[in-house]
Amino acid sequence: MAKRCAKSLATTTKREQASASRAAWPSADPPVADHTTIPFGARFWRLWRPVWRLRHKANGLLFPVLLLFWVLLLISPYIVINRLAAWAEHTPISAETVAQRDTLKVSQQDGRTAWDPKSLFRDSEGRFLDYKIPAIDWTIWFYLSLFGYYCAFFAAQKTDRGRAESLVMAQAWVVTSWIAYPIFALLPADIDLRWQLNMEQMTPLYQFLFKAFHTLDEPFNAWPCLHIAQSFVMASALARWWLQRNWTVAVWLLWPAWLGLCVSVMTTKQHFIWDTITGTLLGIGVWAWLMRPGYRHIDAVADDALPLAKLG
């Protein structure tokens, strides 16, 4: 009996202490949520502060511009890694190897390749499936559509909630890139597919587009394909914001267009099959790890409880 009374007294004391603790917080200023309850995707980096402080400038239009610029700056090492891989010393492939191109059985890669991704996929006669995929010049429009996704930030609502959602996408975009960079640097692969493009039979416009792109982007940074991974991150955010505006038809068109982009990385001879698979897995993985939990957290809290403390 005495034990039950003591236990009851202890329980009552704990309840009174909890009530007193809650009463100590004014109703207009609730306690800050435990940082550990905020998912990683919604823990915004302090480096966004300069952009965040200007979020109301130009009627809110300056924020997406500056955010895009800041993201592009953070992912700029792509170019450095791409150039370093291309500049590495190597022995050119032999004339005998070049002469066997049409068999589709002999790899055209040189000594700069650490591992050949296309070696995983051959047909019953030993021909590389990557070489068997046709080169289709007009699919470069799907390939170039990646840069249209860069404008996704402008689709977010011009409120702090919408801007917080933009930061979720921005961080996922950067993380996606930096997951791939060590692989690009440590396991370079010469994307030996461009010889299959029949440039002479293309129209002047397509010749210009392919030559310009080849000048800017060396045939490295193969897998995972960031063209696919990054575009998935942006497309998933864009679909969210369009649905908020009830643009359902636009979302229905968005995903077939994205699938066209996925196919185009192979038909423009920019990537291997393996790159496409790993790029898709990377994009979906970052969405599941960062974006989905981040957006769920933002959806679950009130405006005054958004995780914006680090932004000042």
Image: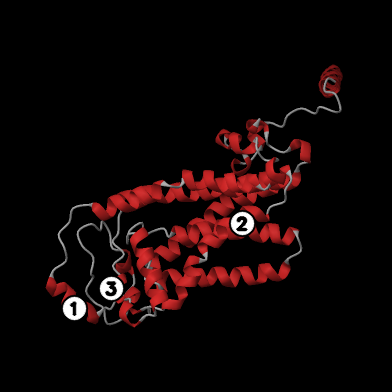
Q: Is any part of residue 222 visible from this angle?
A: no
Tag 3 secondary structure? helix
| Camera-side residue of 228 and 135 | 135
**Residues at marks 3 and 2 touching, judged by CB atoms closer than 8 Å:** no
| Camera-side residue of 209 and 143 | 209
**Relative to 23, does residue 51 appear above or below in the rendering?**
below
**Residues at marks 3 and 1 touching, judged by CB atoms closer than 8 Å:** no
- Residue lying at 34% horizontally and 73% vertically, measured from the top left: 130
Q: Earlier in the sequence, mark 3 or mark 2?
A: 2
Q: Quadrant of the C terminus?
A: top right
- Residue lying at 55% horizontally and 35% vertically, measured from the top left: 47
| Camera-side residue of 198 and 135 | 198
Q: What residue is pinned by disc 1? A: 100
The image shows a total of numbered marks equal to: 3
Q: What residue is pinned by disc 2? A: 152
Q: Is residue 262 left or right of residue 107?
A: right
| CA neighbours of label 1 inside 10 A, class few (<14), some (14 to 19), many (20+) | few
User: What amino acid type should be assigned to the residue bearing mark 3?
Assistant: Trp
Q: Give percent across and percent down for residue 279.
A: 46, 60
**Alpha carbons under labels 3 and 1: distance apart:** 13 Å
- Residue lying at 23% horizontally and 57% vertically, measured from the top left: 112
Q: Earlier in the sequence, mark 1 or mark 2?
A: 1
**Relative to 146, does residue 71 appear above or below in the rendering?**
above
